[in-house]
Structures are given as C-alpha cells and as structure tokens.
Amino acid sequence: PAPAPATPPKLGFTAVAKNKNDLVTVAEGYNVSILHALGDPMHFGDESWKDDGSETPDSYNRRIGDGHDGMYYFGLSEAGAYQADRGDRGLLAVNHEYVVAPYVLHPAGRTAGAARNATEVEKEIYAHGISVVETKRDNASGAWSMVRGSRYNRRVTSATTMDITGPARGNALLATKFNAAGQQTRGTNNNCANGYTPWGTYLTCEENFLNVISRAAGDDATRSAKEIAGLNRYGLPQNRKSPYLWETAGTDDLFARWNSSITGATAADDYRNTINTFGWVVEIDPFAPTSTPAKRTALGRFNHEGAWPAPAVAGKPIVFYMGDDSRNEYIYKFVSKAVWDAADVGKGMTAGAKYLDEGTLYVARFNADGTGDWLELTFGKNGLDATNTAYAFADQGDVLVHSRLAADKLGATKMDRPEWGAVHPTTSEVYMTLTNNNDSNRVPPTATPTGRQARPDAANPRYYEDPKGTSNQKGNPNGHIIRWRENATDVTKLNWDIYLFGAQADAAADVNLSGLTDVNDFSSPDGLYFDKRGLLWIQTDDGAYTDVTNCMMLAAVPGKVGDGGVATAAGGTSTIAGAKATADTVRRFLVGPKECEITGIAMTPDNKTLFFNVQHPGEDGTPDWAGKTFGSYWPANQADQTVKKRPRSATVVITRKDGGDIGI
Ligand code: FEO
Ligand code: CA
Ligand code: CA
Ligand code: CA
C-alpha cells in the first residue's frame, strides 16, 4: 500500500461563489495582479501594447504570445542556475497555445478572404509557441513583475529550428524539404499543457496541430494505403483545410510548409510529412536562451496535453504520465532507460538526451475490477510489426510516429478526453482529468458503437444529458478525474479508482456522484496541479456549465486510491467511484472573467505566490471594431470595470494580503 499523505493540509479560505462577472474573483484576503499579457514587450526597443493591433509581426519574436496555457516556474539563483527552492526570483515558461478569436492582435480582427493576409499570418506564426521570462518579487512591496530585457527572456515560435531526437530521429517519416535527413524541423505549435524535468528543463506539449495543417482534395492518389491510414487516424483526411489557412498566405516556405499535399518528387522536396513533425513533447532549457529545443520522440506522438513526472528517486527510472487530448483517446506513460542521478541537475539538454531519448512507452488499459495494465509500445512486441493488419509497422520510429495506431492494436481503454495529470508529491499516486465526452463518441450503454465509438465502461462510467442550459450535451458533459497507484514491483500493473465527478450541485444523484454543493460544484476539469504540500488545484474549461458560471479554479485535499465509496453511475455499469466531496476537501478558490478558460498553474516553492493563466477571455463575441465592443474587456478592467480595452490572454499573480501561504 502507498504511504498516507504526510499531514494533509487543511483548506483555509472562504469559497468563492459561482459568477459570470468580467474579472478574476478570488477568495477574500488575496491580491490579484497581472504579470504579462498578449503583446507585452519582453525586451527594450519595442513599444508597449497599443490596443490597436499595430504591432509588427517581427516584434512578436520579442513579445508575449497569445493563448496563455501550461507553464512552470523555475527558481533562479544569483549565479544564474536552477535553484528549485527559490520563491522570489525565477524563470517562468508559458505556452502560447493558439491565436485567439476575435484576433485582437490584428488591427480589426482577421481579414476575410480565401487567401490569408501575409502580414497577419506571419504575426500569428510568431505569436504561437513559448515565452520564457525572468520574474521577480519586490521584497519591499511584495509586487511581482516581468524583468524586461533579462538575458533569459526568450521566445520560441512556430518558426524556431528544433532538433528531432530519440528513436524517430532520421526516420523517413520525418524527412521534409527543411531537413531531408529528418533530424531537424521548424516550429512548435498548439502547445497546450506542459511538464518539467527533475534536471531543470521545460517540457511543452504539441496538442491541436491540425489547427495549422491542410491537405488538398485528391491527395490520397499520391499516397500509399499505409500513409493514408496514418493520416486518417491523426485526423487529416484529404480535402481538409486547417482553420488558420496559413498555407494560403504565400509561396515562401514560412507559409507553404503548412500544406501537406505533395508537390515534389520525393519527401525531401516537399512538406508531405509536415504533420509527422508535430504532436511531440518538446524540451526547452530555459537557463540556456540560445540552446536548440528538442522534439523527444521516445515519448510518442499524439495530441499531447502535457507530460507530468513522478517524483525522481535516485537509482530509479524517470517516469512521465501523458494524456492524448481527444475524445476516446488514451493515457500513456514513459519510463526512462537511464536511472536518476541527482548530479544531472542543471545539465540541461545533455541530461534531456540521457533520460528522454531512450526508454519504454506504455498505454493504459483500465479493467472493470479496479486493476489496470500498462501495455508496451515497442516494435516487435505485442504484434507491433509488419504483420499488423490495420497498419504495418516498419520500425520503432514508425511505432512512435503512429502511437495511436499502436495503442489501438494493444486494446488500450478509450477515455473521456484525457487532459492534465498531476502526481502526489508524497504518495506518487497519479491523478488525471477526463474533461468530458459527447454522444458522437461515448454512446448509450445499449447502443452499438461504430468506428471508434465506445459505450460507457468502468473507468468512463457516465452517460447522461447536461441537465440545464442550452447545450443539451449528452455523454459525459461534466467530466471526471481518475487516479491510480502504480504496482510497487511490476511496471506493467496499476490499481485505479475515480477521485471526483464533475456535476452541477442540483443534478440528479446518479450524475452528481461526488455530492458536490454550491461551494465546490464544477464542470469539465482540465488543468490539474499538486503543490508541494499535496494540495490539488483543479481548473476548468467548460462548455456545459458556462450557462451558469465562468470557468474556475478549485483547491482540494485528496485522499488515496481505494478510500472511495461505491456508486453506480447514470447510464453506466461501474461500481467504482471516489469518495464524496465535502466543503473541507474540495472548495472553489477563484472564478475567471467572461468567456475564458482557466489553465496553467505554478506555485512558488515557498507557497506564497500562485501563478495561473486566463486563456481566451471574450472569445465568443463578434467584436464591433469601430465601436470597440468585445465579449470581455479583461484584463484591462480587472481593477476598474469601466475600462474598456481589447481582451487578452494573460498570466495572473495571486498572493495573500497578509503575506501568508496560499490556500491554507
Ligand atoms: Fe489545449 Fe487539451 O486543451
Ligand atoms: Ca487543456
Ligand atoms: Ca482545454
Ligand atoms: Ca449547463
């Protein structure tokens, strides 16, 4: 059995009421300030954000990007090294997942037309990716700021050159006109959640890369049946245009490479393999601003939400947990071949190559009796070879590029959108959000599934209709959080239960299985984070409860696997459920502004500062550009609701007014 959490912390704040206000509402006694927002200059020489979209494309190589998402805080020593226990000065790495409609980074939104405006597309390419900025607390005032002009401040964008490393390096599937050898590529895209490594580097994870890759009608005729099977499984059938249409902006490679339809004689002449260069976990050394980021292929290729490490133990492998954020996709784990040596802290990309380029990738099967299996995705094992009928694997690079097809073969469990994971700091039990599912994918228990559909099962037990509002979503519209404990001696075994079910407080008892009330009801858990004390922070990205409240963040004190009750879920067959929630174990800490998602979280190691991100405030509205009306005016209106400026994704800083520890 796993050890009990060491002295579980007690929640010590008054719950925030659900609301639809256009600001961050945090528990009483806490301060809210903005660290940085879309377009803020990171260096000297560029002007401040003007609120009119006039910033140049090139300046976005030195400005904060759009769509703030996953992030991590790395303490920075006076000597410029990683200092894990430093709470008042650090490097904050933030993902800029995508360019948010209504496109406030352009003068008047996105210019309409069949072909995109090249200036706008170039700006969008540089507004994606990652920012690394030095941040500092003024110890007299307690105020945090971005250190403008710091030598560490850096942008990585959708145009940055990256190494391809691990078993798929040099594979023909990754050959492009940019690098015929398949050893490098350009850009990271749609970086959703994140991870970090025990040696002090940042992991950024490529999720919805189909946002930017198009494939023309008739392209199937130029491809092998095997190539077509791979493209279709990753959501890129022929005649599929990306929502961003970057490839229409011009013939320069900066634009043309987003068109994966074949124009050259060989893969080395064109960008037919563009899609295979995305969907990876990318490592960045925030302490070495000129280092080349690496796409670590050993961790597999899918809609990577994030990569969360278990606590590192000397002499043992490093373990990462990962979700493939799509409905009915899978949960994965990577186990390094090298065993942990604390002397590698600070060794940057060299340590990354040691721990992340060799290892074993597994995918999860959750059995109805509460046990589970990690199924090994290794070429030549479990039928992962040329004899596989759905897709004939050629080598380990092929298995990794097509991880989903390999996982299909092994019979992994289709999950209700696996998003963020978090590992308990003392028990090492793993929690993962299953944000929601719909009836296109999770069909009623009596229906006959077609294609990749699935009925409810033990680990994804609910099928019901959103009881309120206009969405009428069916399936599992409110989502849940699964958790598991690894077997102490067998790397292929686990035991699981369900920690918490999302629901609105007034839902039926067979939907509101965790017994949520007004102080803690929520829907669509997405972001998830354990701080060092074992407080679990839950963030929401919801479509089913936004008729009642904006998205939110809750704090929780979880128990451990197996301490739950037994329940039967609506429409399902599971008898495995977590403990009931109470106001003492789950409590709402803050609510965000209008039309936003709350995502990304980092606590400083002294527990005195909490960073989180507000993504896409005001995304639903159709702006009146001349009249300056938007669906939200946040963050400019945080302190004064009469201020009306363009809504921008931003990083928020939370501290306690009395200088105390957050959350307790
Ligand atoms: Fe980018 Fe899975 O949310
Ligand atoms: Ca997410
Ligand atoms: Ca999301
Ligand atoms: Ca609803």
Image: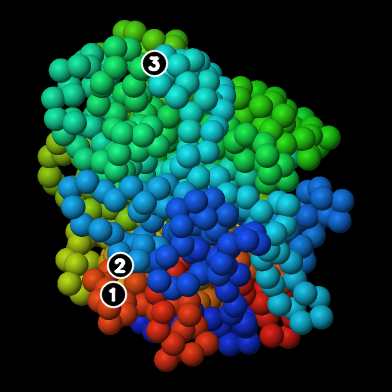
Rendering coords of residue 16 (x, y %): 49, 83
Few, some or many residues within 10 Å of mark 2 (<14, 14–19, 20+): some
Q: Please tell me whether residue 333 is drawn above or below residue 504 in the rendered image.
A: above
Q: Ligand 2 sits in which quadrant?
A: bottom left
Nearest the viewer among 286 and 588 is: 286
Q: Amino acid at mark 1?
A: Trp
Comes first in the chain, label 3 or label 1: 3
Tag 2 secondary structure? loop
Rendering coords of residue 454 (x, y %): 23, 41
Comes first in the chain, label 2 or label 1: 2
* Res 348 quadrant in image: top right
Mark 3 in CB contact with mark 1 (< 8 angstroms): no
Q: Please tell me whether residue 512 is drawn above or below residue 293 in the rendered image.
A: below
- In this rendering, which labeled residue sits more in front, label 3 or label 1? 1
From the image, tell me which residue sits under label 2.
108
Gap in angstroms between the C-alphas marked 2 and 3: 39 Å
From the image, tell me which residue sits under label 1.
625
Q: Quadrant of the N terminus?
A: top right
Q: Please tell me whether residue 233 is drawn above or below residue 514 in the rendered image.
A: above
Mark 2 in CB contact with mark 1 (< 8 angstroms): yes
Gap in angstroms between the C-alphas marked 3 and 1: 44 Å
User: Which mark, residue 270?
Assistant: none
From the image, tell me which residue sits under label 3.
268
